[in-house]
Image (tube, grey):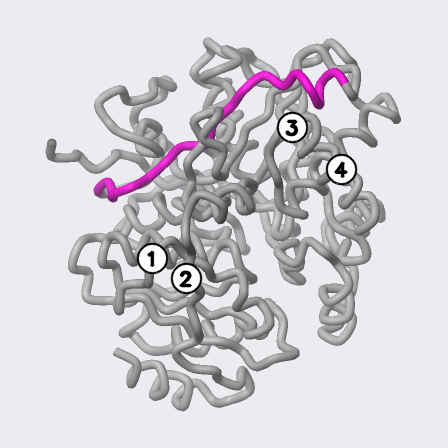
Amino acid sequence: MKFTPTKYTLVNYADGRRFEDTGWMLADPQAAEPSLIRADYEIRRFNPREDLDGFYRYADWLPIRRTLEHSHAPVTYRSEGLASCLGLENLYITFSGYFPKIGARMETCSFKETEAYSVCARIPENSGRILVLASAGNTARAFAKVCSDNNIPVVISVPEDNIGALWFHKPLNSCVKIIAAPAGSDYFDAIALADKLNESPRYMAEGGAKNIARRDGMGTTLLSAVEVIGRIPDAYFQAIGSGTGTIAVWENNLRLIRDGRFGSHKMRLYPSQNAPFTIMYDSWKAHSRKLVPLSAAEAREQASEIKAKVLSNRKPPYSIAGGLYDALKDAGGDIYKVSNDELEIWKAKFLELEGIDIYSAAAVAVCSLAKAVEEGAVRKEETIMLNITGGGEALTKEHHDVTYAKPDAVIDSFLPPEEVINIVDGLF
């Protein structure tokens, strides 16, 4: 079946200016101040597509030009074990990962697949340009898998210390190139490498939180939940590295309100961070739109201490118009912080109660929910959505042999852009 590209208009969050997407637009070219842009879809009712498979059942609210092979959607189910433990009557878990018992079959075990299948489907076929992104691990694995399966050229920049996160069910297609910032580097160093590469017109920045396809892909977690629950939840829990996933569900919440059939309320947002890397928690508790100061040295030290390594973005989209600060101010809620010891406790409890292993980041969200229950921030009868952003790695490695990728090049992030470009050009 031939897919018809989704129709939408772009909107500047800060001033409401509407404009057309001329291609790979990541910002409003006429913006007076930095602001996220949003997609305003022509189809305003939420109707999952029965004619499309996997993730693309939500295509009407995805800014895509085509569909790709081998996608899977998040799976939402009503919790019994964890719900009983916490004394909650209406706890729904949206699970992105590998858990065949409930129908979850994301090969990379992370909700980053929702980003990859959306972003890559926004790229025109035969665009002639090479996608570039930076990642601390899970995003790299997801984009590498999706690009490899669909023959999409991509360069993925990661810290060399995180290369162990790049495991796959089969060797990668040669269209995928992995570059690494040297040992001792962090996520920000990987971003610096990618930025230098993007100075060449041959390469195309993925865009991170600024890319509407990334956010709306992540926002399918809420669509999965609403499809099962039949209404907008009252409260939402997720661990955050950048906060983009929480921004994404807030945006889809507003679309669902406009639809009108699933409630007129905004669910309270409860994102959480792994202490001591708590830049957004600290900023929110200081009642500050501006991020609190965090030096590169401090960020590296804190990132080295946390177990949920993916939650270590030192320049998240918190302050920008339409970012996490605005989301929390508009919808209400709070930010929690969770220690390494606490997340390990709840990782083990989740396995015991729900029957599947989860990542440390997801365990941060579970612990934050337990804290909210203890504090009375949520009531037992409320409808609560817990976004388990990754899990089932231990199970998938029982069921499948895996292969580990190696960097195609290790590149110092302090090299000038022309040297970085020359090195990467030589890989293709």
Instruction: Pick whichever of labels 3 and 1 is earlier in the sequence.
Output: 1
Q: Is any atom of residue 27 visible in this view? A: no
| Relative to 317, 209 lies left or right | left
Q: Are marks 3 and 1 in contact (CB under 8 Å)?
A: no
Q: What residue is disc 3 on? A: 236
- For the residue labelled by badge 3, is the local secondary structure a helix, a strand or a loop? strand
What distance separates the C-alpha of mark 2 from that of mark 1? 6 Å
Amino acid tagged 4: Trp
Residue drawn at point x = 51 percent, y = 69 percent: 158
Amino acid tagged 3: Tyr
What distance separates the C-alpha of mark 4 from that of mark 3? 18 Å
Q: Are marks 2 and 1 in contact (CB under 8 Å)?
A: yes
Instruction: Pick whichever of labels 4 and 2 is earlier in the sequence.
Output: 4
Instruction: Pick whichever of labels 2 and 1 is earlier in the sequence.
Output: 1
Q: What residue is disc 2 on? A: 403
Q: Position of residue 343 (x, y in %)?
A: 76, 44
Amino acid tagged 1: Lys
Q: Residues within 10 Å of mark 2 (few under 14, many from 20)?
A: few
Q: Residues within 10 Å of mark 4 (few under 14, many from 20)?
A: many
Q: Is residue 82 magenta?
A: yes
Q: What residue is disc 1 on? A: 170
Q: Nearer the viewer, mark 2 or mark 3?
A: 2
The answer to which quarter of the image holds residue 364 is top right
Q: Position of residue 60 (x, y in %)?
A: 31, 28
Instruction: Pick whichever of labels 4 and 3 is earlier in the sequence.
Output: 3
Q: Is residue 238 magenta?
A: no
- For the residue labelled by badge 1, is the local secondary structure a helix, a strand or a loop? loop
Q: Residues within 10 Å of mark 3 (few under 14, many from 20)?
A: many
Q: Nearer the viewer, mark 4 or mark 2?
A: 2
